[in-house]
Amino acid sequence: MFSIGNLGFEPAYIISGALVGLLVGLTGVGGGSLMTPLLVLLFGFHPSTAVGTDLLFAAATKTVGTAIHSSGKTVDWKIVARLAMGSIPATLLSMAGIAYFGAASKIVTDTISLTLGIALLISAISLLLKDQILKTISHRYPDFGERHSFRLTVLTGFVLGLLVTLSSVGAGALGTIALIILYPRLPMVRIVGSDIAHAVPLTLLAGGGHWFLGNTDFSLLGELLIGSIPGIIVGSLAARRAPELFLKTCLGLILVIVGFRMLIK
């Protein structure tokens, strides 16, 4: 570590933030799928600290995205409210469980590691097989979203609340695919905007809960943000020319490997 004045910086954290930001900008996949396992497997952070820090990291970055989408009127606040009806109770329930057993307890550590591994594998499958999944469901159930959208959106929010609070993974890739299935006639830009907008209160509430329990490293959070902000900007600009299929295939395979690694950790 080196110091500038009274501030200490760890270059590895800043570089990691930049790389994750670059990949998020290139592929659109949420940083939690990459940042949390990186903090656990590479840097050796406790799973609770990795999740808690990454949740506030996500809240900060997605607040900016929500502001942009909201100004462009590409957020469907009705969908956001439905998702929140499920995700907020799930988040509170999850945090109550973590508080009851203790963030450093073996049962919480094992649950977070297991949830993270499963969430990564599901995200990888969704990323690699998104077109096939959507085609199959739309063919077999053409009016699926129209008939059951309210109840299933609330249920989707509940599942996302559990996954995100316990692993910080799921609000991006999984949320987007679920909304495409439930609202097939909604323009893609509004689906993405609504998913990002819902992620802000979800990650903020979950991150705040982890902070209250002492599971947040603010020094680490600041260094990750220093790297990720320019990384996301560069990645977003480069995405216009990058081979999307190749990038998402490689990222999907990485998530599969990391997911299995978390399960056998």
Image: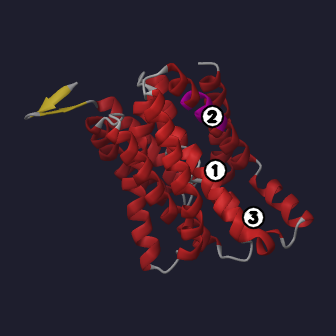
Work out how far the residue at label 1 is from the one at label 2, CA to CA, in angstroms: 24 Å
What element does badge 1 sit on? helix
Is 210 or 57 nearer to us in this picture?
Answer: 210
Q: Nearer the viewer, mark 1 or mark 3?
A: 1
What element does badge 2 sit on? helix
Q: Residue furthest left?
A: 5
Instruction: State the residue at coordinates (32%, 34%).
Output: 214
Horizontal relation, residue 191 to residue 129: left or right: left
Q: Which residues are magenta?
A: 112-118
Is 118 or 161 nearer to us in this picture?
Answer: 161
Give the mark nearest the N terminus, 3 or 2.
Answer: 3
Give the mark nearest the N terminus, 1 or 2.
Answer: 1
- Under mark 2, the amino acid is Ile
- Above or below: residue 31 compared with residue 64: above
- Above or below: residue 176 compared with residue 14: below
Number of callouts: 3
Q: How busy is the neighbourhood of tag 2: few (under 14 within 10 Å), some, or many (20 plus)?
A: some
* Rendered location of residue 136, percent (x, y): 87, 58
Is residue 116 a member of the stretch shown in magenta? yes
Check disc 3 and report the residue beneath it. Answer: 181
- Above or below: residue 142 compared with residue 11: below
* Rendered location of residue 20, percent (x, y): 46, 42
- Under mark 3, the amino acid is Ile
Work out how far the residue at label 1 is from the one at label 3, CA to CA, in angstroms: 15 Å
Q: Which picture quadrant has residue 121? A: top right
- Under mark 1, the amino acid is Val
Check disc 1 and report the residue beneath it. Answer: 159
Q: Nearer the viewer, mark 3 or mark 2?
A: 3
* Rendered location of residue 95, percent (x, y): 47, 41
Check disc 2 and report the residue beneath it. Answer: 254
What element does badge 3 sit on? helix
